[in-house]
Image (cartoon, rainbow, N blue to C red):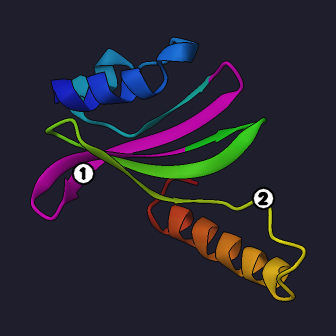
């Protein structure tokens, strides 16, 4: 559990954001609104490994979905796309499709 919280804290260290201790202790879902961020998180198990999943959005960055494992490793599961290449005739359509799927996944995980 300590590595989950430490990895999360490291990812948001610039903004001095960390998981509330009481949520860590009882492994409950929660949310944080601080320094322009809105972060929703929950604890769980993926492939037999304890993890923390969070959805983070900031008014100046792309929304993203991240999973942190108990060993301290993490992976970005997905992120919304803001840009597409004007040279790609299907770029805007693909971006919209991708973002709909991204937010569907976030809702499915209960983080939105």
**Could you tell me residue 110's position as x and y percent?**
47, 58
Tell me: residue 85, above or below residue 5. below
* 65 with respect to 94 (left or right): left
SS type, badge 2: loop
**How many numbered discs?**
2
Disc 1 designates what residue? 44
SS type, badge 1: strand
* 61 with respect to 70 (left or right): right
* 6 with respect to 19 (left or right): left
**Could you tell me residue 42's position as x and y percent?**
36, 44
Residue found at the very far top of the displayed protein: 16
Instruction: Considering the whole magenta stretch, tell me its main secondary structure.
Output: strand
Looking at this view, is 56 or 78 the one in front?
78
Q: Which residues are magenta?
A: 34-55
Looking at this view, is 99 or 110 the one in front?
99
**Could you tell me residue 8's position as x and y percent?**
37, 29
Residue 102 colored in magenta in the image? no
Is the C-beta separation of discs 2 and 1 under 8 Å? Answer: no
Disc 2 designates what residue? 82
- Density class for disc 1 (Cα within 10 Å; few <14, some 14-19, many ≥20) is some
Q: Residue at x 55, y 64 (%)?
A: 107
**Could you tell me residue 17's position as x and y percent?**
49, 17
Q: Give the position of the N terminus as an image quadrant.
A: top left
Residue 53 colored in magenta in the image? yes
Residue found at the very far left of the displayed protein: 48
Q: Residue at x 21, y 35 (%)?
A: 72
């Amino acid at each position: 559990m300590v590595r989950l919280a430490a990895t999360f804290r490291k990812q948001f260290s610039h903004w001095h954001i960390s998981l509330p201790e009481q949520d860590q202790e009882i492994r409950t879902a929660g949310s944080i609104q601080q320094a322009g961020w809105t972060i929703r998180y929950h604890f769980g198990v993926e492939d037999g490994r304890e993890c923390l999943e969070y959805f983070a959005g900031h008014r100046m960055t792309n929304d993203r979905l991240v999973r942190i494992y108990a060993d301290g490793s993490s992976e970005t599961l997905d992120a919304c796309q803001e840009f597409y290449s004007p040279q790609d005739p299907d770029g805007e359509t693909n971006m919209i499709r991708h973002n709909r799927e991204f937010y569907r996944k976030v809702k499915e995980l209960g983080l939105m």
